[in-house]
Amino acid sequence: MPELPEVETTRKGVAPHVVGQCVTAVVVRQPKLRWPVPAELPGLLVGQRIEAVERRAKYLLFRLASGTLMIHLGMSGSLRIVASGAELGAHDHADFQLANGNVLRYTDPRRFGAILWLEGEAFEHELLKNLGPEPLSEGFSGELLHSLAGQRKVPVKSFIMDGHVVVGVGNIYANEALFRAGIHPKRAAGRISLSRYQRLAKEIRETLAEAIASGGTTLKDFVGGDGKPGYFKQSLQVYGRAGQPCVLCGDELKEARFGQRSTVFCSRCQR
């Protein structure tokens, strides 16, 4: 599933090709995504100029004068720049033709993503307004995590993956950040000290920043806006390595499942 680094990689990849360009045509081949694609979308977009491409959590926001085109990549989606007339694939569900001859193409094999039109202030939309801070922003800190944890008994891995606490810490990066911080994923969120949360916040920021710099993590479906895979997979220390030796102590890495998600950890290095 594309997580925050993959979505940010996509944003950075497509932005130079679309910002300042007018939309000349919109073709929706499959409107049945997670939510129906608005039937009026072509009429709303054609003739409009894309002024900016932003990201909030895992949502991409294409800013236009009259509103915002919001795209979510779902479980297996991608958004790429292709040449006009490029051969279509079975899961290429929408094309946004631009005045420069490029096409912004949305592909989604599982159709769990979304293409929506927002009027007014996008950050006030129901999908965005209650989200936690961005993990790479000044609003995110160990102090914040510690204060929100309170006496909560939920496992810390589930806690940091809660989008109301902090956005974008998906499964891969939660595994990696907890390992780097030396915190066991099953430890209750409310039983972690401020100093350990300060370290965890630091590791979350650094893990995500490194993943963005590497173009994200390609495990199966993801490619960036330029069609290239991400390379952070080569830096993974625990995720996908169950049964292999810990890179720090050599003990065998263990695997458990929290909420249908794979969790890999070292029982010696993580407490």
Image (tube, grey):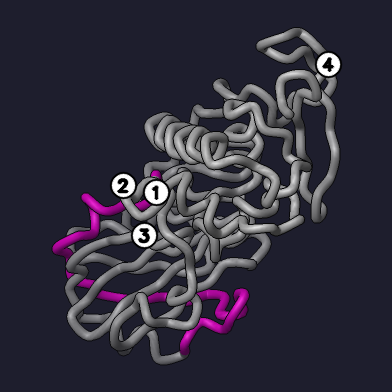
The kind of residue on which mark 3 rests is: Arg
Query: Can I make out residue 229 in this image?
Result: no
Q: Secondary structure at mark 1?
A: helix
Q: Secondary structure at mark 4?
A: loop
Q: Secondary structure at mark 2?
A: helix
- Disc 3 or 2, which lies upstream in sequence? 2
Numbered mark located on residue 252 in the image: 4
Q: Are marks 2 and 4 in contact (CB under 8 Å)?
A: no
Find residue 94 and report its horizontal and vertical position in percent: 46, 69
- Of 85 and 244, which appears nearest the observer? 244
The kind of residue on which mark 4 rests is: Glu
- Of 247 and 178, which appears nearest the observer? 178
Q: Are marks 1 and 2 in contact (CB under 8 Å)?
A: yes
Give the side of residue 48 with respect to residue 40, left or right.
Answer: left
Estimate how packed mark 2 is, as few (under 14), some (14 to 19) or many (20 or more) residues with alpha carbons within 10 Å. some
Spatial separation of the CA atoms under disc 2 and disc 4: 38 Å
Q: Are marks 1 and 3 in contact (CB under 8 Å)?
A: yes
Estimate how packed mark 4 is, as few (under 14), some (14 to 19) or many (20 or more) residues with alpha carbons within 10 Å. some
The residue identified by callout 3 is 55
Seen at 47% across and 63% down, the residue is 132
Q: Nearer the viewer, mark 4 or mark 1?
A: 4
Residue reaching furthest to the left? 20
Magenta-tinted stretch: 9-38
Query: Can I make out residue 235 in this image?
Result: yes
The residue identified by callout 2 is 12
Spatial separation of the CA atoms under disc 4 and disc 1: 33 Å
